[in-house]
Image (tube, rainbow, N blue to C red):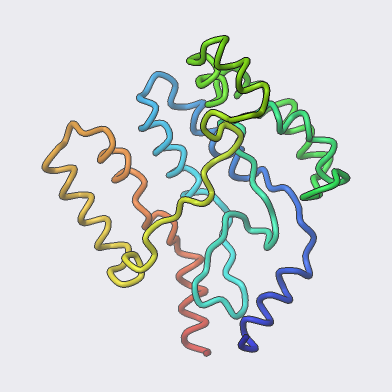
Amino acid sequence: MSHRIQRLKDALFANPREISLERAVLYTESHRQTEGEPVIIRRAKATAHILDNVAISIRDDELIAGNRTIKPRAGIMSPEMDPYWLLKELDQFPTRPQDRFNISDFDQRLYRDELFPYWEKRSMKDFINAQMTDEVKAAVSTQIFSVNQTDKGQGHIIIDYPRLLNHGLEALVCEMQAHVQQQPNNVFYRAVFGVSPIKALREPGWAMALSMEMTG
């Protein structure tokens, strides 16, 4: 392990694990503004809203910068998937036997008073449950099997990093723009093009990266 990687690792583990609601708040803000639009467009706009507004941090020793939160060691919440288990464990995150996370009193109130009331009966969990028959629900309750993954996003599905790093973000944007021009009524292409990854590269990040290059 190089000295740089060791410093990154040490800096990461020097911080406590905690919950960040920044993404959940931004996602919810967008959804409040897009009622009635196609689901895939709403998700795209919510993702774009996050990229436009999420706090950015570029830490010492990072060559590829970027994280889900500005906090170095934080977990995010996805109430749009399943707000119920999050509410159930809200008071238990800091003390539960496994995967403990700190969460502030302010964020606990924010989740109870703002986020949960909005996503109750609007979540993916509610949608899936509405499609299942009583027989399937009874079978799932035995915990012999589960239907899909309704409690959170699919974190193990990642993008094609070699393609991204070898060709760059602009090449992907141009490719998607061509798809949109060829099939202007394709909602999926419109949604993906609307979440241009360039949105994440805002001025503060570029300024800091340029400064690091000039001094490094």
Which residue appears at 53% of the width and 63% of the height?
Answer: 66
Q: Residue furthest top?
A: 134
Query: Is 110 left, or right, of 155 in this rendering?
Result: right
Q: Position of residue 214 (x, y in %)?
A: 47, 87
Q: Nearer the viewer, residue 50 or 141?
A: 141
Query: Is 195 left, or right, of 181 in this rendering?
Result: right
Query: Is 202 left, or right, of 6 in this rendering?
Result: left
Q: Nearer the viewer, residue 83 or 112?
A: 83
Does residue 101 appear in this view? no
Q: Residue furthest right?
A: 95
Q: Position of residue 201 (x, y in %)?
A: 43, 61
Does residue 105 appear in this view? yes
Reply above or below: 44 against 69: above
Which residue appears at 23% of the width and 50% of the height?
Answer: 176
Q: Nearer the viewer, residue 175 or 204?
A: 175
Reply above or below: 36 against 160: above
Residue 95, quarter of the rendered image = top right
Q: Residue furthest front?
A: 144
Pick the quarter of the image with the N terminus. bottom right
Which residue appears at 36% of the width and 32% of the height?
Answer: 41
Reply above or below: 31 against 14: above
Reply above or below: 149 against 210: above
Q: Position of residue 209 (x, y in %)?
A: 49, 75
Residue 55, quarter of the rendered image = bottom right
